[in-house]
Amino acid sequence: MKKILIGIIGFGNIGKKRLEAINKLKKLAEVKIICEKNKIKKQFKNIKIFNDIKELDDYDLDLLIICTPTDVSKKIYNKFVGKCHLLIEKPITLNSKQLLKNIKISNNKKKIIKAGYNLKYDQGLKYLKKNLESNFIGKIYYCKISYANGTARSNSNNVGSIFDMASHSINLLMWLFNSKKLNVINSCNQKNEFSKNHVDNGFAILKIRKILINLHHGFCNWKNKFNIEIYGKKGSLKVHSLAKWGDQTIITEKRVFPSGNPRVKIKKFSNDLSFKNELHSLLETIRDMNKLKYQDIKNINYESYYTLKNSILLK
Ligand SMILES: NC(=O)c1ccc[n+]([C@@H]2O[C@H](COP(=O)([O-])OP(=O)(O)OC[C@H]3O[C@@H](n4cnc5c(N)ncnc54)[C@H](O)[C@@H]3O)[C@@H](O)[C@H]2O)c1
């Protein structure tokens, strides 16, 4: 089987994680080039390294992974739309019209365009979804989700906490509750320390169908935090922390009728497989591209558009 040939633009924190993940999937794919504007000291066998995206024209790649800050990604990704499959770190752009235009071009050229939202590939969150699908908590009543960190002074992706943090939660909620549509009942944001143009903390009340959702996002938490709690008629499901931080706890609680403490089970994960799992799924999609119908490609490609549109509602 022919390997999927990959290029990476931007070799910082996330670019390195992407390479690490691809190296674990060597049967499916290999990285041919890395384009990074700063000097990379390390040499990699069989990978060409350069610093100007113009040099990419000389390579025939199947998949390009763009791991630059959004200010850069939003300008450079246009050049590659429709030419190869694209995985672009979130948020691709804050311009939904431009994104929609590029998604339509990709659909017509049968190319995937996808934003890197990897929470749904986290082990604990996959386990949560499995429990939801098995109807463990019955009819879902409400959900509380919080994704925040302490980067008000150091965050270099100049988009603010709605697009940087809340967009992850929104993408996750759309997946957990199988919905593209999300109603924002109220959203209240603050600009404490980050920048004049973007918010760094906020709370929103949302609804997906009849499920009431309380969402918190921010850069003013002074340490990494991820929490989700979902309550239903028959019990609740809770995920504290992410596997990438090494200490994730999943709590399943079976309700005791008519009232009283629920029966509790606890599970823990400590290995981050989210980047590997996300890439594995994308590489399999690309490998099986010929089997995909036009509608399947559209469903994959529109995900980043709906995530952006729903995030904009929080502004
Ligand atoms: N999925 C996640 O969990 C997650 C987590 C953190 C960041 N991100 C996203 O990843 C993206 C990158 O974040 P990061 O933390 O890796 O940032 P980073 O600053 O560590 O890395 C970005 C790299 O891009 C390079 N670069 C910038 N302009 C370039 C250009 N024109 N050509 C080539 N290289 C260029 C920079 O020199 C830098 O090395 C952001 O969009 C961010 O939102 C995603």
Image: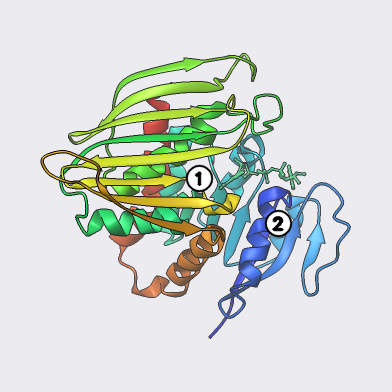
The circle on residue 43 is none
Q: Position of residue 137 (x, y in %)?
A: 21, 49
The circle on residue 241 is 1
Give the residue at x 69% y 32%. Answer: 156
> Is the distance from the Cβ of mark 2 to the nearest ligand 1 atom less than 8 Å?
yes
Q: Position of residue 157 (x, y in %)?
A: 64, 34
Relative depth, front residue between 283 and 119: 119
Q: Residues within 10 Å of mark 1 (few under 14, many from 20)?
A: many
Kind of residue sitting beneath label 1: Ser
Q: Is residue 254 left or right of residue 314?
A: left
Tell me the quarter of the picture where residue 196 sits. top right
Q: Is residue 137 visible?
A: yes
Tell me the quarter of the picture where residue 213 sits. top left
Please say if the residues under marks 1 and 2 sit with CB atoms less than 8 Å apart: no
Dot 1 falls on a residue whose secondary structure is: loop
Kind of residue sitting beneath label 2: Lys
Q: Nearer the viewer, mark 1 or mark 2?
A: 1
Give the residue at x 51% y 49%. Answer: 242
Q: Position of residue 178 (x, y in %)?
A: 26, 48
Q: Is residue 241 left or right of residue 158?
A: left
Give the residue at x 54% y 56%. Answer: 86
The circle on residue 16 is 2
- Assign ligand 1 to one image quadrant: top right
How many numbered marks have been drawn onto this rendered protein structure? 2
Relative depth, front residue between 219 and 11: 219
Q: Position of residue 313 (x, y in %)?
A: 37, 25
